[in-house]
Image (tube, rainbow, N blue to C red):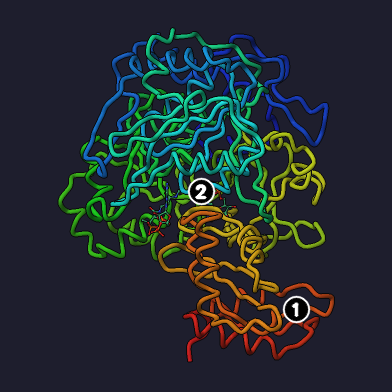
Amino acid sequence: MTNYQEVFTHSITGPESFWGKAAQAIQWTKKWDRVLDESDKPFYRWFAGGELNTCYNALDCHVANGRKDQVAIIYDSPVTDTVRKITYGELLESVSVFAGALTGIGVVRGDTVIIYMPMIPEALTAVLACARIGAVHSVVFGGFAPNELAIRIDDARPKVIISASCGIEGKKILSYKPLMDEAIHLAAHKPEKCVIFQRPQVKADLIPGRDLDWDNFTEGAKPVPCVSVAATDPLYILYTSGTTGKPKGVLRDNGGHAVALKWSMEHIYDVKPGEVFWAASDVGWVVGHSYIIYAPLLHGCTTIVYEGKPVGTPDPGAFWRVISQHNVSVLFTAPTAFRAIKKEDPAGEYLKKHNISCLRYLFLAGERLDPDTYYWANDMLKIPVVDHWWQTETGWPIAANCMGIEPLPIKAGSPTKPVPGYNVQILDADGNRLPDGEEGSVVIKLPLPPGCLPTLWQDDKRYLEYVTERPGYYVTGDGGRFDEDGYLYIMGRIDDVINVAGHRLSTGAMEEIVSKHKDVAECAVLGAEDQLKGQVPVGFVVLKAGVDRKPEDIIAELVQMVRSELGALACFKEAAVVKALPKTRSGKTLRGTMRNIVDGKSYVVPSTIDDPAVLTSIEESARNIGYGKKG
Ligand code: COA
Ligand code: AMP
């Protein structure tokens, strides 16, 4: 079939036959009893009764089928001036040995392991080794501060933490080990062992009895084979921001995940086994899990682990250099990366220095693709620029222009149409379905397709919040609409989640930190539009009565608090001290109105407002820190 509508209709009307067929592309050690188990709604299980091993499908089966000498990973690190190629055969060897070493310290199927590592191939070795022995990995993005890592340690309760001596961010060398030590100190749960990969730039001090040097750890370890696990067993936990300071532990199963990712490589990304697929993201994010690690390897592609930035390492030609040097067929990155390149090289002078005729598609996701960036990328590259929409929870795209099914005409500002498997609908505030053209809450009719979260890690109750607000639907948290041609438009989050340079963050988490300051009575943190990063957080702070310190000193302390408790990636740099926050008569902060003020948009004064004069002072304060309507 090569007709999008036919494929989509089949996926919705006959999900069991659709996904049962897709599952044949995966090697199973035991066939499933049911493709879709609906016996415990709204919890759905895909391929119940089936058994497999995800690492086997990513490595062993390719080595057995003639890909032993094909490059599996290209490690390209402009920050260390390194290019290293690792074949499928070599990767299988190092993963089997590392898995053997983990087994040697008592890690068994079902144990959890936290991985806190920079963009180096050893991060993939650690991930795949966990999958090989049925241990549940939880990768934590290296940019998170110790406090955030500690929260994840206490939730995942890892037996082992795997880390590296340092990460390299542009020109900065960041020691990871002290951050890990601090996190373990803050956490109530203590891991039994920590395995540290020593990089030449920094030698970490190891704590005797607890810490193990990666090289010594693996020396002499015996390679181990794959353990067969249930399709419904957890493969990994990935924490993502919710609306509070407590992150959500998105759970991924083994069977549905492997089937969906493999299917997506052919049908969405139109990439063939043996080709080079580059997701320029980080292993700490969902894009990294799905499209740096698992999907390219499940599909027999070569993946790129890029330790650099789109600009500054060394220049805005960095992406073009990597594409041409490694013969990349498909590039996937965040719009922010393209905005950064466009800002430094608007006329594409650096692009002219490289031959990137190998590149067939550019896929962008992680945040809204603004039409300006779309047109610029399109003009520069002259290949399809495909916006696609998804979330950590789904693990793979919800809406896209499926290049491997039937490329549809592109409309700037839209990620095109729902991907087969996702029955996307738009509901109003009362849960009624809205007609095309009207904007509302974007939901997905249950069941979600394979690969999406079956629940949250040890928190079924919080998972139910996604699926009980609108019974029968998964609520995405995004607002949007369909147009008359069935194209979807995602307009942004309708909760307190923001997207900063493609990084998903919670304003609630920042408010919790700011509120801890001794002089702060209350605060609101909002996402303000930003030309480069899409959004950046901006705070409004009310001080306790009697505080007469200089506002700028307090704000500097707040900026530092968010940086050290959440991480530099939050980019919380601007805040204003105000006399009061605008509230309804029942005491609810008028965040929507404040967001409009900060973005300089017109707004209607809500009839429920307690004191309209407060809005005028917010407008003035926003202007003072460079936001809102000018003049
Ligand atoms: N470890 C430690 N610190 C990190 C980090 C990591 N892995 N990643 C980011 N940081 C730090 C940065 O060093 C920076 O610190 P600073 O305030 O001391 O300078 C801060 O967090 C903000 O980082 P970032 O948002 O990356 O800003 P930047 O100015 O360094 O770079 C871009 C801007 C646009 C080049 C960059 O954000 C980018 O490449 N974005 C693409 C994002 C992406 O791929 N997202 C994945 C979703 S698909
Ligand atoms: P994350 O879980 O980090 O992948 O972030 C998911 C959120 O990013 C979504 O809920 C959207 O708000 C936003 N997002 C991701 N991709 C897109 C896109 N293509 N268009 C608009 N918003 C997007």
Label 1, secondary structure: give it.
Answer: loop
Identify which amino acid the numbered label 2 is placed on: Phe
Which labelled disc corresponds to residue 144?
Answer: 2
Task: Please give left or right for residue 366 compared with residue 239 in the image.
Answer: left
User: Of 85 and 145, which appears nearest the observer?
Assistant: 145
Q: Furthest residue to the front?
A: 208
Quadrant of res 452: top right
Instruction: Please state if 444 lies on the left or on the right of 145 as rendered.
Output: right
- The residue lying at 53 percent from left, 30 percent from top is 161
Q: Amino acid at mark 1?
A: Lys
Percent position of residue 115, x then y? 50, 33
Q: What is the quadrant of residue 360 in the picture?
A: top left
- Look at mark 1 in the image and give the residue it sits on: 583
Location of residue 517 with respect to 217 vertically, above or below: below
Give how far across and how far down residue 544 sits, in percent.
Answer: 69, 78
- Determine crowd level at label 1: few under 14, some 14-19, many 20+ residues with C-alpha closer than 10 A: many
For disc 2, the neighbor class at 10 Å (few under 14, some 14 to 19, many from 20) is: many
| Pointer 2 or 1: first along the chain | 2
